[in-house]
Image (tube, rainbow, N blue to C red):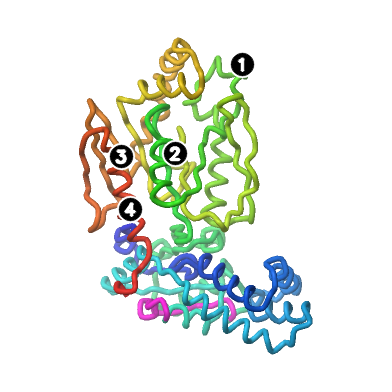
Amino acid sequence: MFNLKNIAEKYKLVMVDIDNTLFNYTFAHKNALEAVMDQYGFTLQEYNLAKMMIETRNLSANHHKKELYFKIICENKNIHFSKASEMFNLYTSAFIKNLKVDKTMSDFLFYVKKLNKKVIAITNFYFIEQIYKLNCANLINMIDYLVCSEEFELEKPNKALVNRALELYGKFIDEEEIVMIGDSIADNFLGGGYRINYYPYNCSKLLISISGKSGSGKTTLSNAINEIYKSFIISTDGYHKYERHSKIWERVTHYNPKANNLIQLAIDIKHIYQDIGNKLHIPIYDHKNGVIVKSDEIEIKDLDIVIIEGLHTLYQEVIGDFVKIKIYIDSDEADRQKIDRDSKERNYSHSKIIDTIQKREEDYKKYLEKQKDNANFLILVRDGIFKIYLKDILLNNYLQKEYTGRYEDLIQTVKDIFDLILKNRWVKENDA
Protein backbone atom coordinates (compact mmCIF):
# COMPACT_ATOMS: atom_id res chain seq x y z
CA MET A 1 0.00 0.00 0.00
CA PHE A 2 2.79 2.43 0.96
CA ASN A 3 6.32 2.78 -0.37
CA LEU A 4 8.81 2.75 2.52
CA LYS A 5 11.93 2.25 0.39
CA ASN A 6 13.41 5.51 1.64
CA ILE A 7 13.46 4.09 5.19
CA ALA A 8 15.14 0.90 3.99
CA GLU A 9 17.79 2.92 2.18
CA LYS A 10 18.38 5.41 5.00
CA TYR A 11 19.16 3.05 7.89
CA LYS A 12 21.75 0.29 8.32
CA LEU A 13 19.72 -1.82 10.75
CA VAL A 14 15.97 -2.35 10.90
CA MET A 15 14.21 -3.41 14.09
CA VAL A 16 10.53 -4.33 13.85
CA ASP A 17 7.64 -5.26 16.06
CA ILE A 18 5.49 -8.18 14.84
CA ASP A 19 1.84 -8.03 15.93
CA ASN A 20 -0.14 -5.18 14.31
CA THR A 21 3.02 -4.20 12.45
CA LEU A 22 3.66 -7.13 10.11
CA PHE A 23 0.10 -8.47 10.24
CA ASN A 24 -3.26 -7.47 11.67
CA TYR A 25 -3.25 -8.99 15.14
CA THR A 26 -6.39 -7.09 16.21
CA PHE A 27 -8.52 -8.60 13.43
CA ALA A 28 -7.16 -12.14 13.83
CA HIS A 29 -7.45 -12.07 17.64
CA LYS A 30 -11.03 -10.77 17.57
CA ASN A 31 -12.19 -13.50 15.19
CA ALA A 32 -10.23 -16.24 16.95
CA LEU A 33 -11.59 -15.29 20.36
CA GLU A 34 -15.14 -15.20 19.01
CA ALA A 35 -14.67 -18.74 17.65
CA VAL A 36 -13.60 -20.00 21.10
CA MET A 37 -16.39 -18.12 22.90
CA ASP A 38 -18.99 -19.58 20.53
CA GLN A 39 -17.66 -23.12 20.96
CA TYR A 40 -17.28 -23.07 24.75
CA GLY A 41 -20.06 -20.70 25.75
CA PHE A 42 -18.35 -17.88 27.59
CA THR A 43 -18.56 -14.13 27.12
CA LEU A 44 -16.08 -11.36 26.43
CA GLN A 45 -16.70 -10.08 29.95
CA GLU A 46 -15.67 -13.49 31.36
CA TYR A 47 -12.56 -13.48 29.16
CA ASN A 48 -11.61 -9.97 30.33
CA LEU A 49 -12.17 -10.99 33.96
CA ALA A 50 -9.77 -13.92 33.53
CA LYS A 51 -7.25 -11.63 31.84
CA MET A 52 -7.50 -9.16 34.72
CA MET A 53 -6.97 -11.94 37.28
CA ILE A 54 -3.76 -12.99 35.52
CA GLU A 55 -2.54 -9.40 35.21
CA THR A 56 -2.96 -8.81 38.98
CA ARG A 57 -0.41 -11.59 39.62
CA ASN A 58 2.42 -9.43 38.22
CA LEU A 59 3.67 -12.17 35.92
CA SER A 60 5.69 -9.71 33.86
CA ALA A 61 6.10 -11.07 30.31
CA ASN A 62 3.91 -14.12 30.95
CA HIS A 63 0.76 -12.08 31.53
CA HIS A 64 0.05 -12.25 27.75
CA LYS A 65 -0.43 -16.03 27.70
CA LYS A 66 -3.86 -16.88 26.32
CA GLU A 67 -3.65 -20.43 27.69
CA LEU A 68 -3.57 -18.98 31.22
CA TYR A 69 -6.67 -16.89 30.50
CA PHE A 70 -8.46 -20.01 29.26
CA LYS A 71 -7.36 -21.93 32.38
CA ILE A 72 -8.92 -19.26 34.62
CA ILE A 73 -12.12 -19.31 32.53
CA CYS A 74 -12.35 -23.08 33.03
CA GLU A 75 -11.93 -22.67 36.78
CA ASN A 76 -14.45 -19.83 36.98
CA LYS A 77 -17.05 -21.78 34.99
CA ASN A 78 -16.36 -25.16 36.63
CA ILE A 79 -15.03 -26.66 33.38
CA HIS A 80 -12.27 -29.27 33.58
CA PHE A 81 -8.87 -27.58 33.21
CA SER A 82 -7.92 -29.83 30.27
CA LYS A 83 -10.38 -27.89 28.11
CA ALA A 84 -8.02 -24.89 28.32
CA SER A 85 -5.68 -26.72 25.95
CA GLU A 86 -8.52 -27.32 23.48
CA MET A 87 -9.52 -23.67 23.72
CA PHE A 88 -5.97 -22.56 23.00
CA ASN A 89 -5.61 -24.91 20.03
CA LEU A 90 -8.90 -23.66 18.56
CA TYR A 91 -7.84 -20.07 19.18
CA THR A 92 -4.51 -20.62 17.41
CA SER A 93 -6.01 -22.29 14.34
CA ALA A 94 -8.70 -19.59 14.03
CA PHE A 95 -6.08 -16.87 14.49
CA ILE A 96 -3.98 -18.20 11.62
CA LYS A 97 -7.07 -18.59 9.44
CA ASN A 98 -7.87 -14.89 9.95
CA LEU A 99 -4.29 -13.63 9.63
CA LYS A 100 -3.97 -10.66 7.24
CA VAL A 101 -0.37 -9.88 6.28
CA ASP A 102 0.41 -6.22 5.66
CA LYS A 103 1.58 -5.68 2.08
CA THR A 104 3.50 -2.50 2.90
CA MET A 105 5.67 -4.25 5.48
CA SER A 106 6.02 -7.42 3.41
CA ASP A 107 7.31 -5.40 0.45
CA PHE A 108 9.49 -3.32 2.78
CA LEU A 109 11.17 -6.34 4.37
CA PHE A 110 11.74 -7.90 0.95
CA TYR A 111 13.47 -4.70 -0.16
CA VAL A 112 15.57 -4.51 3.03
CA LYS A 113 16.84 -8.04 2.41
CA LYS A 114 17.52 -7.15 -1.23
CA LEU A 115 19.80 -4.39 0.12
CA ASN A 116 21.52 -7.06 2.25
CA LYS A 117 20.63 -5.39 5.55
CA LYS A 118 19.72 -7.08 8.83
CA VAL A 119 16.23 -7.21 10.33
CA ILE A 120 15.73 -7.93 14.04
CA ALA A 121 12.23 -8.48 15.42
CA ILE A 122 11.60 -7.49 19.05
CA THR A 123 8.34 -8.74 20.53
CA ASN A 124 6.46 -8.91 23.81
CA PHE A 125 4.93 -12.25 22.79
CA TYR A 126 6.43 -15.73 22.91
CA PHE A 127 9.24 -17.23 20.86
CA ILE A 128 7.61 -20.43 19.55
CA GLU A 129 4.24 -18.72 19.06
CA GLN A 130 5.83 -15.92 17.02
CA ILE A 131 7.85 -18.36 14.89
CA TYR A 132 4.62 -20.16 14.04
CA LYS A 133 2.87 -16.93 13.06
CA LEU A 134 5.85 -15.69 11.01
CA ASN A 135 5.97 -19.03 9.19
CA CYS A 136 2.26 -18.89 8.39
CA ALA A 137 2.67 -15.30 7.19
CA ASN A 138 5.60 -16.32 4.93
CA LEU A 139 7.80 -13.73 6.64
CA ILE A 140 10.14 -16.00 8.61
CA ASN A 141 13.02 -15.76 6.13
CA MET A 142 12.92 -11.96 6.18
CA ILE A 143 13.80 -11.85 9.90
CA ASP A 144 17.44 -12.46 10.90
CA TYR A 145 16.95 -12.55 14.67
CA LEU A 146 14.00 -12.66 17.06
CA VAL A 147 14.24 -11.17 20.56
CA CYS A 148 11.34 -12.01 22.91
CA SER A 149 10.26 -10.63 26.26
CA GLU A 150 10.11 -14.12 27.80
CA GLU A 151 13.91 -14.38 27.49
CA PHE A 152 14.29 -11.68 30.13
CA GLU A 153 10.87 -11.64 31.82
CA LEU A 154 10.86 -8.00 30.76
CA GLU A 155 8.93 -6.10 28.11
CA LYS A 156 9.65 -3.34 25.64
CA PRO A 157 10.95 -0.68 25.94
CA ASN A 158 13.24 -2.30 28.55
CA LYS A 159 16.91 -1.90 27.66
CA ALA A 160 17.65 -5.61 28.05
CA LEU A 161 15.74 -6.43 24.85
CA VAL A 162 17.38 -3.64 22.86
CA ASN A 163 20.85 -4.51 24.15
CA ARG A 164 20.35 -8.14 23.15
CA ALA A 165 19.31 -7.06 19.66
CA LEU A 166 22.48 -4.97 19.37
CA GLU A 167 24.58 -7.93 20.57
CA LEU A 168 23.03 -10.14 17.90
CA TYR A 169 23.80 -7.55 15.23
CA GLY A 170 27.41 -8.30 16.07
CA LYS A 171 29.23 -5.12 15.08
CA PHE A 172 29.43 -1.52 16.09
CA ILE A 173 26.66 0.70 14.79
CA ASP A 174 25.72 4.25 15.64
CA GLU A 175 22.25 4.23 17.20
CA GLU A 176 21.14 6.95 14.78
CA GLU A 177 21.70 4.45 11.95
CA ILE A 178 18.97 2.20 13.39
CA VAL A 179 15.21 2.45 12.92
CA MET A 180 12.55 0.72 15.02
CA ILE A 181 9.19 0.22 13.29
CA GLY A 182 6.20 -0.70 15.43
CA ASP A 183 2.60 0.01 16.31
CA SER A 184 2.97 0.72 20.01
CA ILE A 185 4.37 3.52 22.13
CA ALA A 186 6.50 0.76 23.73
CA ASP A 187 8.39 0.48 20.42
CA ASN A 188 9.71 4.03 20.74
CA PHE A 189 13.09 3.55 22.41
CA LEU A 190 13.93 7.27 22.41
CA GLY A 191 12.36 7.56 25.84
CA GLY A 192 14.72 4.85 27.14
CA GLY A 193 17.81 6.92 26.50
CA TYR A 194 18.59 5.49 23.07
CA ARG A 195 19.01 7.53 19.90
CA ILE A 196 17.29 4.84 17.82
CA ASN A 197 14.88 6.38 15.33
CA TYR A 198 11.21 5.42 15.60
CA TYR A 199 8.69 5.08 12.79
CA PRO A 200 5.14 4.33 13.97
CA TYR A 201 3.38 1.75 11.84
CA ASN A 202 0.13 0.09 12.90
CA CYS A 203 -1.28 -2.02 10.08
CA SER A 204 -4.58 -2.45 11.96
CA LYS A 205 -5.22 1.29 11.54
CA LEU A 206 -5.22 3.52 8.46
CA LEU A 207 -5.42 7.24 9.23
CA ILE A 208 -6.30 9.74 6.50
CA SER A 209 -6.26 13.53 6.91
CA ILE A 210 -8.13 15.92 4.62
CA SER A 211 -7.54 19.67 4.82
CA GLY A 212 -8.41 22.78 2.82
CA LYS A 213 -10.35 25.99 3.24
CA SER A 214 -14.01 26.01 4.19
CA GLY A 215 -16.15 24.80 1.29
CA SER A 216 -13.30 23.08 -0.56
CA GLY A 217 -14.99 19.68 -0.42
CA LYS A 218 -13.42 17.98 2.61
CA THR A 219 -16.65 16.40 3.83
CA THR A 220 -17.69 15.36 0.31
CA LEU A 221 -14.33 13.63 -0.13
CA SER A 222 -14.60 11.94 3.29
CA ASN A 223 -18.01 10.56 2.39
CA ALA A 224 -16.71 9.34 -0.98
CA ILE A 225 -13.91 7.36 0.69
CA ASN A 226 -16.44 6.04 3.21
CA GLU A 227 -18.46 4.65 0.29
CA ILE A 228 -15.40 2.63 -0.80
CA TYR A 229 -14.71 1.28 2.69
CA LYS A 230 -16.66 1.92 5.88
CA SER A 231 -14.65 4.48 7.84
CA PHE A 232 -14.83 6.40 11.09
CA ILE A 233 -14.95 10.11 10.22
CA ILE A 234 -13.77 12.78 12.65
CA SER A 235 -14.80 16.33 11.79
CA THR A 236 -12.40 18.62 13.61
CA ASP A 237 -15.00 21.40 13.86
CA GLY A 238 -15.60 19.90 17.29
CA TYR A 239 -12.10 20.98 18.31
CA HIS A 240 -12.97 24.69 18.06
CA LYS A 241 -12.24 26.20 21.46
CA TYR A 242 -15.34 28.36 21.43
CA GLU A 243 -18.98 27.86 20.56
CA ARG A 244 -20.72 29.92 17.88
CA HIS A 245 -22.04 32.75 20.05
CA SER A 246 -18.75 33.44 21.83
CA LYS A 247 -17.57 37.06 21.51
CA ILE A 248 -14.04 35.78 20.86
CA TRP A 249 -14.98 35.06 17.23
CA GLU A 250 -15.16 38.83 16.73
CA ARG A 251 -11.38 38.94 17.25
CA VAL A 252 -10.17 35.68 15.65
CA THR A 253 -11.28 33.47 12.79
CA HIS A 254 -11.75 29.71 12.72
CA TYR A 255 -8.64 29.52 10.51
CA ASN A 256 -6.41 30.67 13.38
CA PRO A 257 -4.81 27.63 15.08
CA LYS A 258 -5.08 29.37 18.45
CA ALA A 259 -8.87 29.22 18.17
CA ASN A 260 -8.73 25.42 17.97
CA ASN A 261 -7.77 22.77 20.50
CA LEU A 262 -5.03 21.24 18.35
CA ILE A 263 -3.18 19.78 21.33
CA GLN A 264 -6.20 17.61 22.17
CA LEU A 265 -6.59 16.66 18.51
CA ALA A 266 -2.93 15.57 18.39
CA ILE A 267 -3.40 13.49 21.56
CA ASP A 268 -6.54 11.82 20.17
CA ILE A 269 -4.80 10.98 16.87
CA LYS A 270 -1.85 9.45 18.74
CA HIS A 271 -4.14 7.43 21.04
CA ILE A 272 -6.16 6.12 18.10
CA TYR A 273 -3.13 5.07 16.05
CA GLN A 274 -1.20 3.51 18.92
CA ASP A 275 -4.22 1.94 20.66
CA ILE A 276 -3.52 3.87 23.86
CA GLY A 277 -6.38 3.36 26.29
CA ASN A 278 -9.57 1.49 25.50
CA LYS A 279 -12.15 4.21 24.96
CA LEU A 280 -12.37 7.72 23.59
CA HIS A 281 -14.85 10.59 23.32
CA ILE A 282 -14.64 12.93 20.32
CA PRO A 283 -15.96 16.51 20.56
CA ILE A 284 -18.69 17.18 17.98
CA TYR A 285 -19.77 20.60 16.72
CA ASP A 286 -23.53 20.94 16.32
CA HIS A 287 -23.86 23.25 13.31
CA LYS A 288 -27.56 23.70 13.93
CA ASN A 289 -27.21 25.09 17.44
CA GLY A 290 -23.57 26.20 17.39
CA VAL A 291 -22.59 24.18 20.47
CA ILE A 292 -19.94 21.53 21.10
CA VAL A 293 -21.10 18.19 22.48
CA LYS A 294 -19.33 14.97 23.41
CA SER A 295 -19.61 11.88 21.23
CA ASP A 296 -20.73 8.50 22.47
CA GLU A 297 -17.98 6.27 23.80
CA ILE A 298 -15.72 4.94 21.04
CA GLU A 299 -13.84 1.65 21.33
CA ILE A 300 -10.37 2.49 20.01
CA LYS A 301 -9.51 -1.13 19.13
CA ASP A 302 -12.58 -1.35 16.89
CA LEU A 303 -11.40 1.50 14.65
CA ASP A 304 -9.91 0.54 11.30
CA ILE A 305 -9.91 3.34 8.71
CA VAL A 306 -10.17 6.77 10.32
CA ILE A 307 -10.64 9.97 8.31
CA ILE A 308 -9.75 13.22 10.07
CA GLU A 309 -11.18 16.15 8.10
CA GLY A 310 -10.89 19.80 9.00
CA LEU A 311 -8.98 23.03 8.73
CA HIS A 312 -5.74 22.12 10.52
CA THR A 313 -5.42 18.39 9.90
CA LEU A 314 -2.10 18.56 8.04
CA TYR A 315 -0.14 20.42 10.70
CA GLN A 316 2.89 18.20 11.33
CA GLU A 317 2.68 18.89 15.07
CA VAL A 318 -0.86 17.51 15.04
CA ILE A 319 -0.59 14.40 12.86
CA GLY A 320 3.05 13.35 13.38
CA ASP A 321 3.86 10.19 11.42
CA PHE A 322 0.57 8.58 12.46
CA VAL A 323 -1.44 9.86 9.49
CA LYS A 324 -0.23 8.11 6.33
CA ILE A 325 -2.47 9.62 3.63
CA LYS A 326 -2.43 13.42 3.75
CA ILE A 327 -4.87 15.14 1.39
CA TYR A 328 -5.02 18.87 0.73
CA ILE A 329 -7.71 20.42 -1.49
CA ASP A 330 -6.87 23.74 -3.15
CA SER A 331 -10.01 24.63 -5.09
CA ASP A 332 -11.26 27.81 -6.75
CA GLU A 333 -14.74 26.34 -6.21
CA ALA A 334 -14.42 26.59 -2.40
CA ASP A 335 -16.03 29.99 -1.84
CA ARG A 336 -18.94 29.27 -4.19
CA GLN A 337 -19.53 25.88 -2.51
CA LYS A 338 -19.35 27.45 0.95
CA ILE A 339 -22.00 30.01 0.01
CA ASP A 340 -24.23 27.27 -1.39
CA ARG A 341 -23.74 24.93 1.60
CA ASP A 342 -24.05 27.50 4.39
CA SER A 343 -27.19 29.02 2.93
CA LYS A 344 -28.95 25.70 2.29
CA GLU A 345 -27.71 23.43 5.09
CA ARG A 346 -26.94 25.93 7.86
CA ASN A 347 -29.50 28.62 7.04
CA TYR A 348 -26.94 31.45 7.13
CA SER A 349 -27.72 34.72 5.33
CA HIS A 350 -25.84 35.49 2.11
CA SER A 351 -24.32 38.67 3.56
CA LYS A 352 -23.07 36.83 6.66
CA ILE A 353 -21.39 34.15 4.52
CA ILE A 354 -19.65 36.73 2.29
CA ASP A 355 -18.48 38.66 5.36
CA THR A 356 -17.05 35.47 6.88
CA ILE A 357 -15.19 34.57 3.67
CA GLN A 358 -13.62 38.03 3.43
CA LYS A 359 -12.56 38.07 7.09
CA ARG A 360 -10.90 34.66 6.79
CA GLU A 361 -8.92 35.22 3.58
CA GLU A 362 -5.84 36.69 5.26
CA ASP A 363 -5.76 33.89 7.83
CA TYR A 364 -6.19 31.32 5.07
CA LYS A 365 -2.95 32.45 3.45
CA LYS A 366 -1.25 32.77 6.83
CA TYR A 367 -2.31 29.52 8.50
CA LEU A 368 -3.95 27.04 6.13
CA GLU A 369 -2.38 27.28 2.69
CA LYS A 370 1.08 26.30 3.94
CA GLN A 371 -0.29 22.85 4.81
CA LYS A 372 -0.02 22.01 1.10
CA ASP A 373 3.68 21.34 1.71
CA ASN A 374 2.79 18.47 4.07
CA ALA A 375 0.35 16.80 1.66
CA ASN A 376 1.23 13.62 -0.22
CA PHE A 377 -2.14 13.70 -2.02
CA LEU A 378 -2.61 17.23 -3.41
CA ILE A 379 -5.80 18.16 -5.27
CA LEU A 380 -5.81 21.38 -7.32
CA VAL A 381 -9.02 22.65 -8.94
CA ARG A 382 -8.88 25.53 -11.42
CA ASP A 383 -11.44 26.65 -14.01
CA GLY A 384 -13.38 23.37 -13.96
CA ILE A 385 -10.27 21.14 -14.26
CA PHE A 386 -8.71 19.09 -11.45
CA LYS A 387 -5.17 17.83 -11.04
CA ILE A 388 -4.09 15.29 -8.42
CA TYR A 389 -0.43 14.98 -7.44
CA LEU A 390 0.77 11.97 -5.42
CA LYS A 391 4.18 11.86 -3.74
CA ASP A 392 6.33 10.27 -1.03
CA ILE A 393 4.95 6.98 0.33
CA LEU A 394 2.10 7.00 -2.22
CA LEU A 395 4.49 6.56 -5.15
CA ASN A 396 4.27 2.92 -6.22
CA ASN A 397 3.75 0.70 -9.25
CA TYR A 398 -0.06 0.71 -9.25
CA LEU A 399 -0.78 4.44 -8.88
CA GLN A 400 0.04 7.26 -11.26
CA LYS A 401 2.00 10.29 -10.08
CA GLU A 402 -0.57 12.63 -11.59
CA TYR A 403 -4.25 12.50 -12.51
CA THR A 404 -6.23 15.16 -14.37
CA GLY A 405 -9.80 15.59 -15.57
CA ARG A 406 -13.02 17.57 -15.42
CA TYR A 407 -14.11 18.81 -12.00
CA GLU A 408 -17.33 16.77 -12.14
CA ASP A 409 -15.20 13.61 -12.39
CA LEU A 410 -12.99 14.41 -9.37
CA ILE A 411 -14.89 12.39 -6.78
CA GLN A 412 -15.03 9.26 -8.95
CA THR A 413 -11.30 9.57 -9.66
CA VAL A 414 -10.53 9.80 -5.93
CA LYS A 415 -12.73 6.77 -5.28
CA ASP A 416 -10.88 4.83 -8.00
CA ILE A 417 -7.53 5.75 -6.45
CA PHE A 418 -8.64 4.65 -2.98
CA ASP A 419 -10.05 1.45 -4.38
CA LEU A 420 -6.56 0.62 -5.69
CA ILE A 421 -4.90 1.66 -2.43
CA LEU A 422 -7.17 -0.55 -0.33
CA LYS A 423 -6.86 -3.51 -2.71
CA ASN A 424 -3.12 -3.37 -1.99
CA ARG A 425 -3.47 -3.19 1.78
CA TRP A 426 -3.03 -6.91 2.46
CA VAL A 427 -0.91 -9.64 0.88
CA LYS A 428 -3.06 -11.92 -1.26
CA GLU A 429 -2.44 -15.67 -1.27
CA ASN A 430 -0.98 -15.61 -4.77
CA ASP A 431 1.41 -12.79 -3.73
CA ALA A 432 3.04 -14.89 -1.03
- What amino acid is labelled 4 in the image? Asp
How far apart in space, not on screen, are marks 1 and 3 (Cα)?
35 Å
How far apart in space, not on screen, are marks 4 and 2 (Cα)?
26 Å
Crowding near the residue tagged with mark 3, few <14, some 14–19, many ≥20 C-alpha atoms within 10 Å: many
How far apart in space, not on screen, are marks 1 and 4 (Cα)?
45 Å
Which mark is in front, 4 or 2? Answer: 4
Residue contact between numbered discs 2 and 1, judged by CB atoms under 8 Å? no
Q: Where residue 124 sits in the image (x, y, percent)? A: 56, 73
Which mark is in front, 1 or 4? Answer: 4
Q: Earlier in the sequence, mark 2 or mark 3?
A: 2
- Secondary structure found at label 1: helix
Q: Earlier in the sequence, mark 3 or mark 4?
A: 3
User: Who's the residue at 60% across and 56% down the image?
Assistant: 276
User: What residue occupies the far bottom of the structure in this picture?
Assistant: 82
How far apart in space, not on screen, are marks 3 and 4 (Cα)?
17 Å
Label 3 belongs to which residue?
378
- What amino acid is labelled 1 in the image? Lys
| Residue 419 disc label | 4
Task: Using the image as rendered, state which of residue 324 and residue 404 is in the foreground.
Answer: 404
**192 inside magenta stretch:** no
Q: Earlier in the sequence, mark 2 or mark 1?
A: 1
Where is 344 relative to 261, above or below?
A: above
- What amino acid is labelled 3 in the image? Leu
Label 2 belongs to which residue?
315
Query: Where is residue 292, by image quadrant?
Result: top right
Label 1 belongs to which residue?
247
Q: Earlier in the sequence, mark 4 or mark 2?
A: 2
How far apart in space, not on screen, are marks 2 and 1 (Cα)?
26 Å
Residue contact between numbered discs 3 and 4, judged by CB atoms under 8 Å? no
Q: Quadrant of the N terminus?
A: bottom left
